[in-house]
Amino acid sequence: MTTAADLLRTSPLPALETRVLLMHVLGWRRTELITRDHESLDAKAVERFEALAQRRLNGEPIAQLTGKREFFGLEFEVSPDVLIPRPETELLVETALEAIADTPNARVLDLGTGTGAIAISIAHARPDAGVWAIDRSPAALDIARRNARNLLGAAHAVTFIESDWTAKLDPSLRFEVIVSNPPYIAKDDPHLTQGDLRFEPRGALTDDADGLSAIRIIIDTAPLLLAPGGALWIEHGYDQADAVRHLLTARGFTGVRSIRDLAGIERTSGGAFIG
Ligand code: GLN
């Protein structure tokens, strides 16, 4: 017989990853890994665990193996069709929520929504807000729509639109805040060939150019869609804050600043557009 204790002892994966995959395969809570660790496991479950462990050893991200990732206290479905939500992106959600703290029924636009993590987290924290979320990938939108239904309920206030940036968005709409975590990795950045990134959609990671081309489009377009005094906040790479602040200032944004993530890296930059 094989027990969870056996697998925890013999797995070649880091202990945390072994625990996450075991909980997933067995449908157990973290505490059950302790209280039930000497139970004989179903042979099928052991096989499933071993198959997933092998895929992990081949580099597949844990979130794709379990099909989920927590973000802003919510559990999002993920797949190889979407960027896996990152903890540092919670900063963008917090910043957007601050920007609309005093605005009832605020309108929010999320460009390149992927899993929907940013848009749905904002809608969850502010049920009075109207949230629009755009992605050009129909496969990503399927996941985002499911996440919205599961996390916000059937009557949720997120409008999903399949569009290349704002091309198909009603141009008469106006937003108090626009947010985006666009593809910002430069096309020749070696990170694209390392770790989890190898398994994520390339179009969610890189603009296949200098890393700033999506950010330029967003900064150019946002003023046309912002309500007077509305704010734009963009996540960017660890070395792009200067360039993004420069682009925002050149486009006429005011109060332009960057905010550091928990690792101390300037991770999101933004400003307001008075008009
Ligand atoms: N933050 C991701 C990474 O560096 C990239 C996400 C993005 O391009 N928006 O792994």
Image: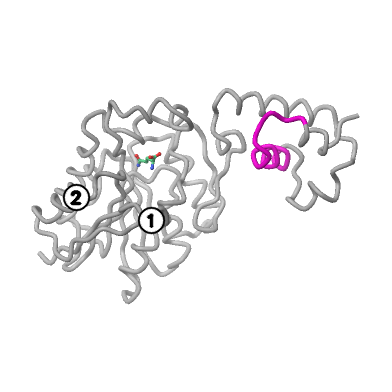
**From which residue to which does the magenta span run?**
10-24
Name the residue nearer the viewer: 233 or 17: 17
Q: Residue at x 58, y 38 (%)?
A: 67
**Magenta stretch: dominant SS?**
helix
Q: Quadrant of the C terminus?
A: bottom left
Q: Residue at x 52, y 40 (%)?
A: 78
Q: Quadrant of the N terminus?
A: top right
Image quadrant in which you'd find residue 260: bottom left
Q: Position of residue 169 (x, y in %)?
A: 25, 48
Residue receiving disc 1 = 261
How is colour applied across the structure in the image?
one colour
Q: Residue at x 73, y 37 (%)?
A: 25
In the image, farthest residue toward the bottom: 102
Q: Is residue 227 magenta?
A: no
The amino acid type of the residue labelled 2 equals: Asp
**Quarter of image, ligand 1:** top left
Residue receiving disc 2 = 242
Using the image, determine if residue 37 lies above or below residue 178. Answer: above
Q: Position of residue 212 (x, y in %)?
A: 21, 39
Is 74 situated left or right of 6 in this image? left
Kind of element beneath mark 2: helix
Is 235 situated left or right of 35 in this image? left
